[in-house]
Image (spheres, coloured by chain):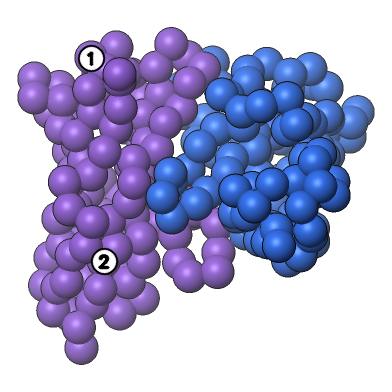
Chain colours: A purple, B blue
Amino acid sequence: GESVGLHLPTLSVQEGDNSIINCAYSNSASDYFIWYKQESGKGPQFIIDIRSNMDKRQGQRVTVLLNKTVKHLSLQIAATQPGDSAVYFCADLYNNNDMRFGAGTRLTVKP
Amino acid sequence: KAGVTQTPRYLIKTRGQQVTLSCSPISGHRSVSWYQQTPGQGLQFLFEYFSETQRNKGNFPGRFSGRQFSNSRSEMNVSTLELGDSALYLCASSPTDRSSYNSPLHFGNGTRLTVT
């Protein structure tokens, strides 16, 4: 069936390096995508979103790239900090009423 | 602005019991969604309420039910608890229903339910 998922369950980076977290989606009708960050003991926190009519969107230290041709979404975090350690989820919305979440990538930042 | 508030934070119940979880959305938000999060299944959608009406429902048995009040606060009920119901239950609110663009969900910190 249709799904959204992440390429790697874990990612370890050095503090100060850039991080790239990837996500693939299967439904070409998906038209809205969101990245969430979940720290231990907390609920998912909204990071950034992008509509399907865009290829790129930037926030503070984060950039989301959308490649609709290969149905791929990525989150780039610049100058990764220890506070960025968390689980990152991508989510997509299609048919205007069904939001699905990927399994998550655990990002660990090494000092 | 206060965030989404879920109570209680932790619950321990035994099989066969029922449980009610509560969620207060961000002020002004009219949509409340509930999700179950487990290590094996990730985040799974339970249901969404908008203006006291259930708009969408996920693929969960009828033991899982919910409601929304006129002040947008929502409750979720699970009857005849099973061991497999142990999970983190997350509530999320948004200003509009999910048919609108640029309307990300804002999550609470969840209720950790343990069924023994």
Which quarter of the image is occupied by the C terminus of chain A? bottom left
Q: Which structural element holds mark 2?
A: strand
Count of all numbered marks drawn on residues in the image: 2
Q: Is residue B115 left or right of residue B46?
A: right
Q: Residues within 10 Å of mark 1 (few under 14, many from 20)?
A: few
Q: Of the residues shown, which amino acid type is indicated by label 2?
A: Leu
Q: Residues within 10 Å of mark 2 (few under 14, many from 20)?
A: many
| Closer to us: A96 or B59 | B59
Q: Is residue A36 above or below residue B64?
A: below
Q: Which structural element holds mark 1?
A: loop
Q: Which image quadrant for residue A15?
A: bottom left
Residue at x-position 63% and y-position 21%:
B57
Q: Is residue B13 left or right of residue B107?
A: right
Tag shown at residue A28: 1
Residue A34 visible from this viewpoint: no
Q: Chain of mark 1?
A: A
